[in-house]
Image (cartoon, rainbow, N blue to C red):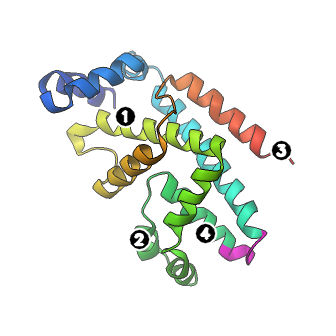
């Protein structure tokens, strides 16, 4: 994996189209540099991302289960969370078996609207999702040699969400701070 980051650094110098953007990333963050030194930066980022994903799912499941059947609420919360983390609802639908496939089929058209609704109404959730998307985007650039970490549809979805909701949210990409924020998000939002 670290060799891929070395390629990332070399590509930054060679690719004029992305050079300015890649220089900006390296200026704002130290995770590529730390990864080159052998630190578990990627592991920390994935741990934070998982905390954000699980917390967001729990928040949505609780909210939706007050308004609809619990199983449907769970599936909707799962698909909205997936959408917010760059995953394809269509792909989930095609991979699912019955009865899950039928439920996803019934709700898949409302998933983007529900995702946008929660991003508009919950500022803390919005900030954590956008920070998570920033990391996904930058990790993807680190894997360009192998075609990237994200699929084309995931990249488009990540870009859409960042462009729509990223204004005013810092692109500070310190991985340790990201994990700290993710842990606090989980603690603050899942107190019962």
Of the residues under marks 1 and 2, which one precedes in the sequence? 2
Give the left or right position of residue 89, taking residue 66 as reference. left
State which region is magenta: 66-72
Of the residues under marks 4 and 1, which one precedes in the sequence? 4
- Per the image, the residue denoted by label 2 is 90
Q: Quadrant of residue 12?
A: top left
The residue shown at (53%, 84%) is 102
Q: Nearer the viewer, residue 53 or 42?
A: 53
The residue shown at (53%, 67%) is 111
Separation (CA) of disc 1 from disc 2: 24 Å
Residue 76 drawn at (x, y percent)? 61, 69
Separation (CA) of disc 4 from disc 2: 13 Å
Of the residues under marks 3 and 2, which one precedes in the sequence? 2
Q: Nearer the viewer, residue 168 or 9?
A: 168
- Per the image, the residue denoted by label 3 is 191
Quadrant of the drawing holding the N terminus? top left
In the rendered structure, are the residues bearing label 3 and label 2 in contact, judged by CB atoms less than 8 Å apart?
A: no
- Per the image, the residue denoted by label 1 is 138
């Amino acid at each position: 994996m670290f060799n891929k980051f070395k390629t990332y650094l070399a590509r930054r110098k060679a690719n004029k189209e992305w050079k300015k953007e890649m220089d900006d990333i390296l200026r704002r963050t130290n995770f590529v540099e730390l990864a080159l030194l052998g630190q578990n930066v990627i592991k920390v980022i994935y741990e934070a991302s998982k905390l954000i994903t699980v917390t967001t799912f729990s928040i949505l499941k609780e909210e939706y289960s007050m308004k609809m059947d619990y199983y449907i609420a769970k599936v909707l919360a799962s698909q909205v969370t997936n959408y917010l983390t760059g995953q394809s609802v269509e792909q989930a639908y095609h991979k699912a078996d019955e009865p899950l496939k039928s439920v996803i089929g019934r709700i898949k058209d409302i998933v983007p609207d529900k995702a946008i609704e929660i991003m508009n109404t919950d500022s803390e959730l919005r900030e954590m999702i956008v920070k998570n998307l920033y990391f996904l985007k930058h990790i993807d650039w680190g894997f360009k040699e192998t075609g990237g970490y994200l699929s084309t549809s995931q990249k488009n979805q990540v870009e859409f969400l960042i462009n729509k909701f990223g204004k005013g949210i810092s692109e500070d990409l310190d991985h340790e701070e990201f994990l700290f924020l993710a842990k606090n998000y989980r603690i603050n939002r899942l107190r019962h």
